[in-house]
Amino acid sequence: MPKKTISFEPADRLKVLPPYLFAEIDRRKRELIAKGKDLVDFGVGDPDIPTPAFIIDALSEGARDPRNHRYALDAGMPVFRESIARWFKKRFQVTLDSGKEILPLIGSKEGIAHLPLAILNPGDVSLIPDPCYPPYRSGTYFAGGVPYILPLLESNGFLPDLSQIPNDVLAKAKVLYLNYPNNPTSAIASKAFFQEAVEFAHKHHLLIAQDAAYCEIGFDGYEAPSILEIPGAKEVAIEFHSLSKTFNMTGWRVGFAAGNEEVIRHLAKVKSNVDSGIFQAIQLAGKKALDEGASAHRANLGIYQRRRDLLIDGLKNMGWEVNAPKATFYCWIPVPPGSTSGEFAAKFLTDLNIVVTPGNGFGAYGEGYFRLSLTLPEERIQEALKRIQKAHRHPHAKADSK
């Protein structure tokens, strides 16, 4: 008797999600690589620079200690939390209670995705910028929450206009997501904006979830502030940090949340039910990075700034109207007239074998832009510029551009 095929439908919460942007890009990249194509990949923001050797040595030493082979503490090792508190004090002049106001994470993405489970009930509203890092939206859906979109417009410096949120939405809203320096737009926020956001959160009884994953990637002397520097911020804000971009540790999965003690406790309770903490050797390596990584971090910034200048100057010389980012390792560039961001990205991929990220993958208000990541060597950037120069001269290029 033949066996009947059994089909398992996905949960409704998965049906509302679009395909995860970078998974789809990766699929198309693999297809072209299999055909022998030489891709120049400006896609995912994944540092190509190796993790510094002294951090790897700390991991190796920790991994050899049998005490680190058992389950990690859910709240993270005290020595790691204390190191985070010292780094925060030195970097932002903000004092944190390492036992109550800091929570190590298996990468900041994990904490961002789990936060809605800790604070939202079904039907509660998340105020989500658009374009944005996709987990703000997907985490809200997983918790049964309702996203309310805040357009990030170039005319407003890619900052949300909080005054435009309707009162009936604010009555249901529980959390406001911010992300500065911003992915994908590379926009920065001033302390004055953070002050406005903190006052807004106090007025409307909101939690601010500020994603600061790129706060250490700044150029031309720019250093991003922490929202926790603002008086009263700890009462209404939690900030997510990551070692991934600062120390080239994306695959290590280590970051932390800091801020409101009550929310830290709620998030820790969610995590205690879904994971068993970070491998302690990785926490010890993270401690080493925060304690001794300043020179390695400065070296990274020098590399990214040279790449930024090479790419931006090359595009400008071809007539593209582009601005050099002050922070993040992304360039957010308008799509030439006549194409959607998806069409433009597909054309670059098929015609030039260059991977760029279409802006609409970050939300509807990302349409009209594409993102380039600076996480590839200068010679590959030069190769991409040669291909663009040869085949895709910008329509607004100056008459004497070659």
Image: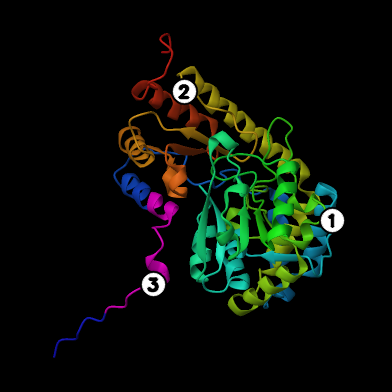
* Mark 1 and mark 2 residues within 8 Å of each other at the beta carbon: no
Q: Which mark is residue 358?
A: none
Which residue is rendered at x = 58% and y = 66% of the image?
172
Residue at which label 3 appears: 12
Instruction: Inspect the image, locate mark 2, and give the three-letter code of the amino acid beneath it.
Output: Trp
Could you tell which of marks 1 and 2 lies nearer the N-terminus?
1
* Residue 203 visible in the current orientation: yes
Rendered residue at 53%/28% (across/down): 311
Q: Considering the numbered disc 2 on the image, is that residue within a helix, a strand or a loop?
A: loop
* Residue 298 among magenta residues: no
How far apart are the two marked residues, 1 and 2, measured between alpha carbons? Answer: 44 Å
Please name the residue that numbered disc 2 is placed on.
Answer: 320
Does residue 107 show up?
A: no
Q: On the rendered structure, is 18 left or right of 291? A: left
Foreground mark, 2 or 3? 3
Q: Magenta span covers which residues?
A: 7-26
Along the viewing direction, whichever of 372 and 203 lies nearer the viewer: 203
Residue lying farthest to the left in this orientation:
1
Return the residue nearer the eye: 119 or 169: 169
Q: Residue at x 65, y 46 (%)?
A: 180
Residue 249 pos. (x, y %): 63, 53
Please name whichever residue, 250 or 50, is drawn nearer the observer in this view of the structure: 250
